[in-house]
Amino acid sequence: MATSKTVTKVKAADPAAEQAKKFVPSPENKKKAITFRIIAALLWLAGIAAEVVAILQLRNAEPVMWLLLVLIAADFLLVVGGSMLWKKANRLDPASEKNKFGFFVQNQLGVLICAIAFLPLIVLIFTNKNLKGKQKGILGAVAIVAVLGAGFLSYDYNPPSVEQYTEEANRVIQLTGKDEVYWTQSGTKYHLYDDCYTINTDKTAEIFTGTIADCHADKNITELCKICEGNALKDPALPGSQLADTQEDVAEEETVDEAA
C-alpha cells in the first residue's frame, strides 16, 4: 500500500565530491612506497638466488653442510627483510578492498615469496641422495623452521586499505574539522588532543602529530582514543559537538517513529 505522505527525491551526491573524500597517498609517501617496494623486490630476488645456490650445492656429490646452513640463513634474512619493507610500503600506499584478489596479493605477497624461496629447497633436501640421514634431518629441520618463521613474520595480520584510511580520516575531520592526530611510539591508539592524559605521562618522551596517513606510516595504529572522541563530541568549539547533537536528534526521532 502506497504512503499518503509526500515523497521527495534527493539528488545523489556529486561523484567528484565523493572522490575528493577518498584517501590518496601524498607524492612523498607514494615515492617512498615505490622505493621500498623496489628494494624489497631486490632482497627477495637475492633470497631466491641464495636458494638456487643451495640447490646447486645439493647436486654436488658431497654437499658442504656449513655452506648450506649459511645459504638457508641468508635466504631467511633476505626474504624477511624484503617482507618488512613491503609491509612498510603498504602502510604508505595501501591497496583497495574493492579488488579482493589484488588486495590479498599485495598485502600477503611476502608469504608467497617465502613459499617460492624455501619449498623447492626443502623438497630437494629430503629427496637428495647425496645427503646422509642425519644431514637430511638437520638441514630439513633448519629449512622448515626458516620457512615457518619467515612466513609468520611476512604475513600481514592487519593489512591496511584505502577504505580504512578514508573512514578514519573522515571520522577525525567530522570530530575536529581537520585530519590531524597525535600518537606515541609505545602507544596503541591515536588521539585528537595532544594533552590527552593517557599520553601525557612521565613515561612519554615524545608525542608525534600528523595526518591519519602519517600515523599509519610511522606506526600501525588503527584505533581512535575513546576519551578523545568523547571530549570532541562534547567540545562546543569543535564540529564534533554538532555531530553529537545530530545523533541525539536522530535517536529521538527513531524513538518517536517506533512509538508511533
Image (spheres, rainbow, N blue to C red):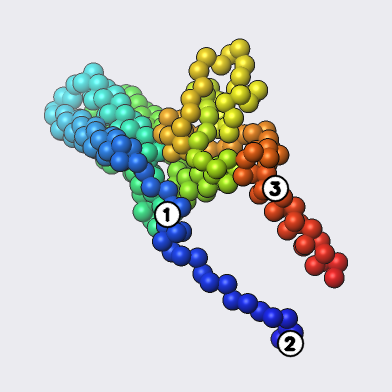
First in residue order: circle 1 vs circle 3? 1
**Residue occupied by mark 2:** 1
Q: Which residue is depicted at the point 23% across and 18% down?
A: 66
Q: Amino acid at mark 1?
A: Ala
Give coordinates of residue 63: x percent, y percent.
Answer: 18, 25
- Residue nearest the viewer, comparing 156 with 65: 156
Q: Which residue is depicted at the point 36% across and 32% down?
A: 84
- Residue nearest the viewer, comparing 49 with 139: 49
**Residue occupied by mark 3:** 244
Q: Label 2: few (<14), some or many (≥20) within 10 Å?
A: few
Q: CA distance from mark 1 to mark 3?
A: 24 Å
Which part of the image, by quadrant, shows the C terminus? bottom right
Q: Amino acid at mark 2?
A: Met
Q: Label 1: few (<14), some or many (≥20) within 10 Å?
A: few
Q: Is residue 72 visible?
A: no
* Side of 134 relative to 227 (left or right): left
